[in-house]
Amino acid sequence: MKEIIFSSEFFNATDTLECGQIFRFEKKQEGYLVISRDKACLVKTVGESTIITCNESDEGYFTNYFDLNTNYANIYNLALNSKFEVLKKSCQLGKGVRILRQDSQEMLYSFLISQNNNIPRIKSIIGKLCEKLGDKKTFLNYEYYAFPTFEKLVCQNEDFYKQLGFGYRAEYMRYLSSELKNGLMNELKNCNANQVKARLLKIKGIGEKVANCACLFGFYKTDSFPVDTWIEKIYREDFNGQLTNPKKITQYFESTFKENSGYFQQYLFYYKRTLQGK
DNA sequence: TACCAGGTCTGAC
DNA sequence: GTCAGACATGGT
């Protein structure tokens, strides 16, 4: 077993996990059990340290996953010195937030499920999906299930997904799975944010918001700024925004925050959602 | 009961 | 190009 010890100043386990970017984690007595693909680790923040416990062979994977080689002090200071009061407050509340480098396919499926849905229910649906189709694994004394491969997902019919509570999103699973089967990931290699987004928008069930979330959380395009109902709220109330078209709101933020769009979006999202109840 | 959740699609203008 | 209404489900 390997322990990765990191300063908690810009890496707080709760901030990073509870800010809505990841749906696969459980609070345990020893910390958070975090699951990605078929791997798991334990994360906890104690005083000035955040400690990741994982298998020796996964050290590289989780170092990258938690984005440990990016300097968040720079990002934080830019937010703190911005002209927007709400961003200053947001980054102070969410100082310990990091943008996770999650698995692209897992994020595509997860945010496909997320549409017009709430976070507890998204977590529950994804959990059931993994339990049904993912390989059973063990880490320390915990049992968990890997995220299913698209090869397994593409074989299921709509009724299967409906029984798990997917609702009208059940048919979207089929479109995404068949795109993956036909080599979508290969097409998206070496693409920039706009190219990834444009390609994803051709898939039925993926719109502006899901495409942006996939770009940011699954392809680590930090110049993406997803706009959901919470961000629309903050745009109206705290940025005195007049635009009503979410696509234009995205463009406004992306041209304002540029390569830091994704980080600032998470600060803002976490802030608004924390203040107004989950 | 009505409304909402990390929205998207369709069809009408 | 914009906009209203439909769409499954469970929580409040």
Image (cartoon, coloured by chain):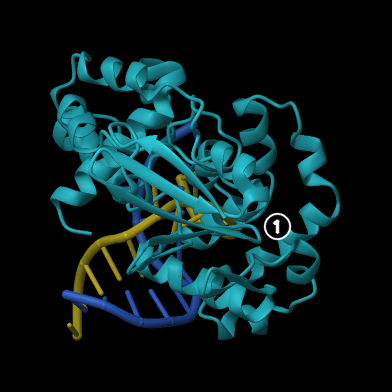
Chain colours: A cyan, B yellow, C blue
Residue drawn at point x = 58 percent, y = 81 percent: A162
**Occupied quadrant, residue C4:** bottom left
- Residue A85 visible at all: yes
Q: Which residue is mark 1?
A: A176
Q: Nearer the viewer, residue A85 or A34?
A: A34
Residue drawn at point x = 31 percent, y = 42 percent: A12
Residue count near mark 1 (Cα–Cα under 10 Å), binned few <14, some 14–19, many ≥20: many
- Residue A166 visible at all: no
Instruction: Give coordinates of residue A246: x percent, y percent.
Output: 39, 38
- Amino acid type at mark 1: Leu
Q: Nearer the viewer, residue A97 or A64?
A: A64
Q: Secondary structure at mark 1?
A: helix
In the picture, the quarter occupied by the C terminus of chain A is bottom left
Residue drawn at point x = 30 percent, y = 51 percent: A14
- On screen, A180 above or below A240? below
Residue drawn at point x = 31 percent, y = 40 percent: A49
Q: Relative to C5, is A149 on the left or the right?
A: right
Instruction: Give coordinates of residue A98: x percent, y percent.
Output: 40, 36
Instruction: Give coordinates of residue A35: x percent, y percent.
Output: 54, 60
